[in-house]
Amino acid sequence: MKPALPQALLLLGLALLPAIGQAIYLRHDIAWEAAPLLPDEVKLVDARAWGNSLLWVDARPNEQFEEAHIPGAILLNEDHWQELLPQMLALWSPDRRTVVYCSRQTCAASHEVAKRLREDAGLKDVYVLHGGWESWQEMNR
């Protein structure tokens, strides 16, 4: 009976090796570490469901916008706020929801632009895309 215990422990240890390896390799992709949805954020699937009543606003730098952006999105960032805001407001209407995005989940530019649209421009129904541009790219691969 005694020799069976070390063999059982060895087999258990070998069985756990793939799980340990996967946990180490995928440590940044763990679902329970996903950022929670903030009150002013919207998930991409929900935003897309709004259809044509949606106005996409790209808060990234000009160069990133010119490289690629969500189809139909308009550029409005902090660096060129004064010159870009009138163009954005010309496309906005009270019956449209506005979704602002920037590079990724940790990018604060989208939250800042959304806040300014609410507070400075007095717009309602302004949201931030949860996950930012990265979430758009992921869904559209």
Image (spheres, grey):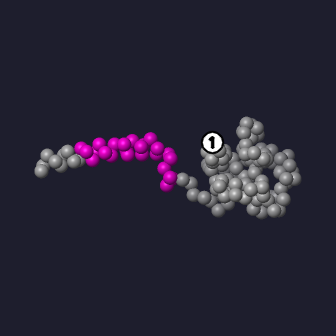
The residue under label 1 is 141
Predominant secondary structure, magenta span? helix
Q: Where residue 58 appears, x then y in whole percent?
A: 74, 47
Q: Which residues are magenta?
A: 10-33
Q: Is residue 27 left or right of residue 111?
A: left
Q: Where residue 134 appears, x then y in whole percent?
A: 63, 45
Residue 21 colored magenta?
A: yes
For the image, the number of numbered tags is 1
Residue 35 colored magenta?
A: no
Residue 99 seen: yes
Toward which corner of the image does residue 10 lie, by quadrant?
A: top left
Residue at 65%, 55% in the rendered image: 45
Q: Is residue 17 left or right of residue 111?
A: left
Q: Where residue 49 appears, x then y in whole percent?
A: 70, 58
Between 117 and 49, the residue placed more toward the observer is: 49
Residue 77 seen: no
Label 1 crowd (10 A; few <14 / some 14-19 / many >=20): few
Between 58 and 15, the residue placed more toward the observer is: 15
The quadrant of the image that shows the C terminus is: top right
- SS class, disc 1: loop
Residue at 48%, 50% in the rendered image: 30
Q: Where residue 86 appears, x then y in whole percent?
A: 87, 51
Q: Disc 1 marks which amino acid? A: Arg
Question: Which residue reaches farthest left?
Answer: 1
Residue at 12%, 50% in the rendered image: 1
